[in-house]
Image: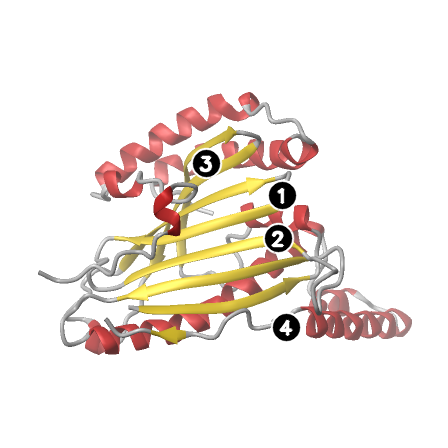
Amino acid sequence: MVKFCAGSFLFPYTWDVVARGLWVRYPNSQSTHVLSEDTLERYVENGKLFTRRLLVKTNPAPKWADRFISKRFVNIVEESIVDPEAQTVVTYTRNIGFTHVMNVVERVVYRKTDPAKLGEEDGFTIAERSAWLSSGVRGFAFAIEKFSLERFKHNTKKANAGLAESIQRMLGVHPVSKIESASSGEKLRVAAAAKAKELKELARSKAEPVYAACRHREDAV
Amino acid sequence: MESVGAECTELKREYDACFISWFSDKFLKGDKDDSVCAPLLEVYKKCVQNALKEKNINVDEVNIRVLGTDDENRIPPGKSSP
């Protein structure tokens, strides 16, 4: 059993904006492996919104994994609870099928920043991610888990970047390149470059993990 | 975004558009009445359930609810091979 805590990621947007962004996150340039997205169930209970969705993703696996994983697609179920009182969104994601080969469960809590906490500026949103990865393939579990952990870390970065991109699109914030290409005159170009620099700096300062909530731990079973 | 069943994609788009405006304009502002998009969701959900069967996706496994239940706080079982 491998448990991995991926730590936290700061989105420079208010909680409600991130909550809306989560529903329009696909497609984005980081999510080309997501083939379909469906709502299976949705209801309001005790003032909270419960949703269960199905995502179908491509499943690129290394050559050595062919003997364990024959399917080209992986089905993912994503459950979520939006709690407007607590101002949180919790997502819980698990893969369906071939879980004996690799079982990945990910839980993400999106919450508003708490100025009382170190490094948290008011009015933004923090995503706190934890995940459990495990493989039950005798003799290969360690290799499969190690590979999956590396891929998971990589995908986490893409997931955060993809969500940020979708939020920008939703808010009508154009990517930097578009601002530059849209400007014709020199004055506009300079203004756009300044804006681009500002955005880049904002992205750099806000898009860094503010702290590592927990170090990853590998417990051999 | 596409639906898992090509025949459901148009229904999905209609429902998603309804949902996102309800979520932004009603739900987040305190109005919890979700009946406005319910008819669209019903038709779309049925389409998806049929598509799942056609594609041999395990409906039972897909329909298990974990989040918000006791199972959520349990460490997911490390499925071991027999």
Disc 1 and disc 4: Cα gap in Å?
Answer: 25 Å
Describe the element under mark 1 as helix, strand or loop: loop
Q: Amino acid at mark 1?
A: Ala
Q: Amino acid at mark 2?
A: Arg
Of the two numbered discs 3 and 2 in the rendering, the one whose residue sits closer to the viewer: 2
Disc 3 and disc 4: Cα gap in Å?
Answer: 35 Å
The image shows residue B15, relative to residue A126, as above or below, that is above
**Are both tags, 2 and 4, on one chain?**
yes
Question: Closer to the N terminus: mark 1 or mark 2?
Answer: 1
Q: Amino acid at mark 3?
A: Lys
Horizontal and vertical percent for residue B53? 23, 37
Residue beneath disc 4: A208
Residue B49 or residue A99, whichever sits in front: A99
Classify 10 Å Cα crowding around label 1: few (below 14), some (14-19), many (20 and above).
few
Classify 10 Å Cα crowding around label 2: few (below 14), some (14-19), many (20 and above).
many
Name the mark on residue A5: none
Disc 3 and disc 1: Cα gap in Å?
Answer: 29 Å
Name the mark on residue B12: 3
The image shows residue B2, relative to residue A136, as above or below, that is above
Question: Closer to the N terminus: mark 1 or mark 4?
Answer: 1
Residue beneath disc 2: A111
Q: Would you say B65 lies left or right of B32 here?
A: left
Describe the element under mark 2 as helix, strand or loop: strand
**Are both tags, 1 and 2, on one chain?**
yes
- Disc 3 sits on a residue from what chain? B
Q: Are marks 1 and 2 in contact (CB under 8 Å)?
A: yes
Q: Amino acid at mark 4?
A: Glu
Residue beneath disc 1: A86
> Which image quarter is the N terminus of chain A in?
bottom left
